[in-house]
Amino acid sequence: MKKSLYETDEAVIEGIRRSDENALAHLYKLYFPMISHFILSNSGTDDEAKDIYQEGVIVFYEKIKGDSLELTCQIKTYLYSVCRRLWLKRLAEKGRYATKLDESESYLPVEEDTQQHEEQERQFGLMGEALAQLGEPCRSLIEDYYIRMQNMQEITDKFGYTNTDTAKNQKYKCLQRLKKIFFATYKPEV
Amino acid sequence: MLEYRAYEEIERYLNGQMAAEEKAGFEALLRTDATLAAQVQEHRQLLLTLQHMGERQQLRQQLKGIHARMERDQASAPPAAWKVFWNRHRQTVAVAASVSLFSVFGALWSVQQLKKPVQQHTAQYVELRREVERLKKAQTAIINGINDATKPAPQPAAFSGTGFAISANGYVVTSSHVVEGADSIMIENKTGLKYKVSEIYRDEIHDLSILKVAEEDFQGFGKLPYTFKGTESDLGERVFTLGYPREDIVFGEGSLSSASGFEGDTTAYQISIPLNPGNSGGPLLDDRGNLIGVISGKQAGQEGAAFAIKSAYLLQLIDELALSGQVEPLVLPKNNALFSQNRPQQLKKLQDYVFVVKVYN
């Protein structure tokens, strides 16, 4: 029953736009075997297959969410192309150049999408490090406020500040430090 | 503290929490104050990065969940060994199956093709028993109806063939297919002598049946003028037969054209005598009046190819019958009265011992 709900690519995309987790799960299960097969037959492991596939799905998902994807082909082809690109990159990083890939599908050039994704990954990596350097309780405070979008009152209660002003002041100091650490290492690539 | 205130401002600006007036003022300030503008830019990027990072972490978590569930589902139903095998070798199996199917049916088909001409031959073998026409049956019924309306019409014979005496004490031989499925059998010779007979022995393989006269006041046929030949006759020998392909007795003459019968059947001769339905069971004699065979059939669509069972098999059958011991001793004729006579003389003597066999059912 569930399957028939997302029979077409359009239905899946529509589901993702609505943040329907079932649509995402359906999509995920549908094409995992294909990518897994591709990675495994090109000197990859199960874990690598899972990794690459999840990256691919993230690229696709964010594209859909950001409304920046003009899908001119099937989702299947797009996912395959992205994962293929990512895997080639990964192989190159491992110092192994695949001279001949065992291809099972046709693919599209998706350099731009994957590059953007990797740039973001780099950025997030740096941010993660910066947050780690920040130490507690600054890190939790920042994450709670800016990522989990909790309001000042909740944060005040959670961290045991006397009032919201103290919390705000604390947050300001933390953010100031984070900014310094982050921008010391991060130079946006233009 | 000033910095702190500025942060508040920037954040409110970025979150779109400023009122229109305040916002216009702030934007004006941004255009003049480059440091502030750079700060706002940095701040925006920081916040966006944090936000995106959060979203992506959440998504990654979600995918991990999905993957874990998927693996759990698969683990709960581990693919059976045959399924793995099937997935791997599906194509090969399909090809093998179609090849074997093709070869089996191909072989069957070609065997069928090879058999076909043989089947045609079989279909062409015609047994020479005669079906008595419908027309005649109807006529008889009308005549009887005129004479005596109350009496039920006597049933005419359904089939007829030929038979001949093999001993003086009432034994007659004919083809099995003539008397097949008979309720009652009558024999009648040229002179009009009629006997009721019954079948007492049958050899379906050689298509021979022995009949015996079943009448109490039967006196015997008298001395038979011909003898039986136990050895094979030679190719080209002149042979003749008498039979009842119609109401009257008909003579046919030809020669022994092959020592084997239909499809190389060594129990029969091929003879070149024109034969018709009703000739079945007739005697085949050579020039010297020896009985050498029993007429059995012919090949359809081929002229002059008729077949007769060799007399050796008739003798064999008679021996078997004697051994079974259930019947009166069967005395075969020993003297040949036809020897060194011309054909009309031979026929005159012979015709009393050749009968039309009428089969009722």
Image: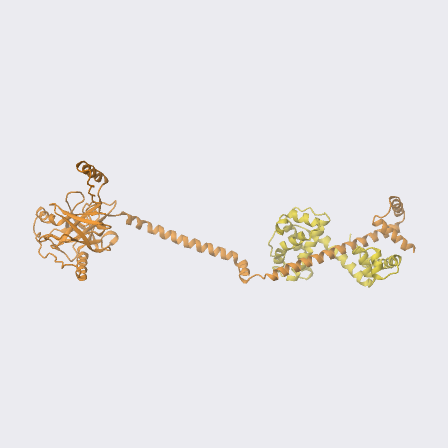
Chain colours: A yellow, B orange
Q: Quadrant of residue B245?
A: top left
Q: Residue furthest front?
A: B150
Q: Residue furthest right?
A: B1
Depth check, front residue: A153 or B347 = A153
Question: From the viewer's perspective, is residue A28 above or below residue B243?
Answer: below
Please provide percent x and percent y for residue B121.
28, 49
Q: Is residue A165 left or right of residue B275?
A: right
Tell me, yes or no, if residue A180 can be seen here.
Answer: no
Q: Is residue A59 left or right of residue B335?
A: right
Please provide percent x and percent y for residue B181.
24, 50
Number of labels in the image equals: 0
Q: Is residue B233 left or right of residue A10?
A: left
Q: Is residue B25 left or right of residue B253?
A: right
Q: Residue furthest top?
A: B146
Please provide percent x and percent y for residue B174.
18, 51
Name the residue at 54% across, 62% down: B81
Depth check, front residue: A95 or B172 = B172
Question: From the viewer's perspective, is residue B261 above or below residue B82?
Answer: above
Quadrant position of the N terminus of chain B in the picture: bottom right
Name the residue at 79% across, 53% down: B48
Please provide percent x and percent y for residue B279.
19, 47
Tell me, yes or no, if residue B238 can be seen here.
Answer: yes
